[in-house]
Every structure is written in C-alpha cells, then in structure tokens.
Image (cartoon, rainbow, N blue to C red):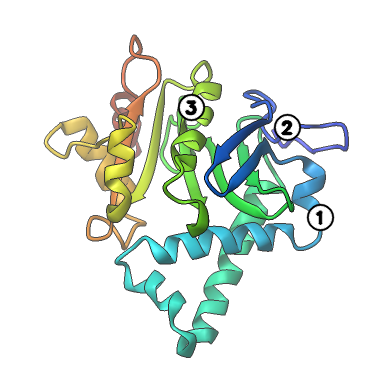
C-alpha cells in the first residue's frame, strides 16, 4: 500500500521512528535526524542527497564504473549515471512504505554530512517483511573516522529489530572490514539455501563478486534465518 506523506509526518519511517540526536565529533557537532516529508520534497534536496551517496561510492570502490565518476573526461557518462541514481532515489523516497528509514546528519550550518537509507528488502521473494536492507550509507570525507557510519547502522538496526528478523546489504569489498566489525558476515556459498539466494541476487549484479560482497546479520536470534524461506520461494519460481 502506498503511503502519502503529509506535513504532519515527522519521520520517514512510520513503523520504526528514530528520535533526533547529536553526535560530537572532532570537527564539531552533527545533528542527526530522520528526514521529514517536507525536507525530501524540497526542490533540489534529492539531488543533494544523491550527490553525497555517489561521491561516497566513487571514493570507496575498485569498480571501474564508479571510478569513472572521478574522471572529468567522462562527464557525459557520469551525468547519465547521476540522473539514473536520482530517478531511483525519487522512486523510493517519494513513494515510501512504513519501513523506509532515511537518517541524515547535518552540521551547524545545515550542510548534509552523512546519510543512511534502509527499507524492507524487495529484490528477492519472501523478504520485504522480514529483512531490513541497508541500501545506501555515506559519510563525507571530513567526518570519516569519527564513528558516524557505525552510529548510523546501529541506530537503524536498533529501531527496526522488532520489525525485521535480519538485515542484509551489498557492501563494497573495500568497506567489508567495517561491516564485519559490526557483526555482519558474508552469505555462505557452501550452504545450499544461501547459495540459492546468492545466485538469485547476483543475476542483476555485474559487480558481484569482484567488487562487492553480500553481507547479513541476524536481528532476532531466536527466529529462522531469512535465506532459508527465501531459498524455498526462489526454488518454487522455477
């Protein structure tokens, strides 16, 4: 069901709201909050948010497709990449469901310095209501090393742990160490159910496994892991 924002809605995540909080860094305070409907719909804001994510991806990968974004001679290609990213962001942010969370950090001058976007994973069967998918995580270079990425992830997972049994993300190999410190592990291709899920998701990922890995973490230890049921549903599709 599509949920339309109105001016009274303070949180992007209706089901898993996160209260605003402050992070003290060596570069000054950052004010972290879920974006409101009005902020998201403000002219140019999604483009501003997209720029943050794209710059982050291009600085933390070995993927030539993203490294090209740093090459001024490839401006036409990069402009198309950016426009495609903006389109995808608009589709997601302007037509949210109750489990979409868009957490963002601003400095005292209201400049965007970091963001984390998550929602129910909808790219594999039987996942949307059980698996939180962290799609985008970015921190401006000035504030890296301050623990902001860890705070984004932990705050998000704390908020969604009653809604979802697991969390899944597709992480750049260069950032895999960061996620492993937070308790994430790779999906295991030696396990039949996990291999089925890996093969299904990888169909649309040219960058796997050369540049990215599939990482997961349980949020409710007493529940069966998400890939067990998902593998069964994938097998039923054939």
For the residue carrying disc 2, how many other residues have a C-alpha within 10 Å: few (<14), some (14-19), or many (20+)?
A: many
Q: Which residue is mark 3?
A: 157
Q: Is residue 238 visible?
A: no
For the residue carrying disc 3, how many other residues have a C-alpha within 10 Å: few (<14), some (14-19), or many (20+)?
A: many
Per the model, the C-alpha gap separating discs 3 and 1 is 27 Å
Label 3, secondary structure: give it: helix
Label 1, secondary structure: give it: loop
Residue at the extreme left of the image, as rendered: 190
Label 2, secondary structure: give it: loop
Horizontal arrangement in the rendering, residue 76 relative to residue 17 (left or right): left
The N terminus, quarter of image = top right
Is residue 19 placed above or below 209 in the rendered structure? Answer: above
Q: Which badge, 2 or 3, is on the more N-terminal residue?
A: 2
Q: Which residue is mark 1?
A: 42
Per the model, the C-alpha gap separating discs 2 and 1 is 15 Å
The C terminus, quarter of image = top left
Horizontal arrangement in the rendering, residue 200 relative to residue 154 (left or right): left
**Which residue is depicted at the point 62% across and 63% down?**
86
Dot label at residue 54: none
Are the residues tagged 3 and 1 within 8 Å (C-beta)? Answer: no
Q: Which residue is mark 2?
A: 11
Per the model, the C-alpha gap separating discs 2 and 3 is 16 Å
For the residue carrying disc 1, how many other residues have a C-alpha within 10 Å: few (<14), some (14-19), or many (20+)?
A: few
Residue 122, given in percent of the width and then of the height, sits at 49, 39
């Amino acid at each position: 069901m599509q949920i339309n924002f109105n001016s009274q809605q303070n949180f992007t995540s209706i089901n898993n709201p996160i209260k605003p909080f402050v992070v003290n860094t060596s570069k000054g305070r950052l004010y972290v909050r879920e974006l409101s409907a009005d902020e998201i719909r403000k002219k140019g804001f999604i483009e501003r948010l997209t720029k943050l994510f794209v710059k982050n991806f291009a600085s933390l990968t070995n993927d030539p497709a993203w490294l090209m974004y740093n090459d001024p001679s490839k401006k036409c290609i990069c402009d198309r990449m950016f426009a495609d990213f903006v389109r995808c962001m608009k589709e997601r942010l302007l037509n949210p469901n109750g489990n979409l969370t868009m957490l963002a950090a601003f400095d005292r001058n209201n400049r965007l310095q970091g963001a984390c976007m998550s929602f129910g994973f909808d790219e594999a069967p039987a996942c949307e209501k059980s698996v939180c998918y962290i799609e985008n995580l970015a921190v401006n270079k000035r504030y890296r090393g301050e623990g902001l990425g860890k705070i984004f992830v932990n705050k998000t997972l704390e908020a969604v742990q009653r809604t979802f049994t697991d969390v899944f993300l597709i992480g750049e190999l260069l950032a895999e160490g960061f996620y492993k410190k937070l308790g994430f592990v790779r999906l295991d291709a030696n396990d039949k159910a996990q291999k089925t899920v890996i093969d299904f998701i990888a169909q649309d990922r040219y960058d796997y496994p050369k540049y990215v890995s599939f990482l997961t973490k349980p949020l409710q230890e007493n529940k069966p892991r998400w890939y067990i049921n998902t593998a069964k549903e994938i097998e039923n599709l054939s």
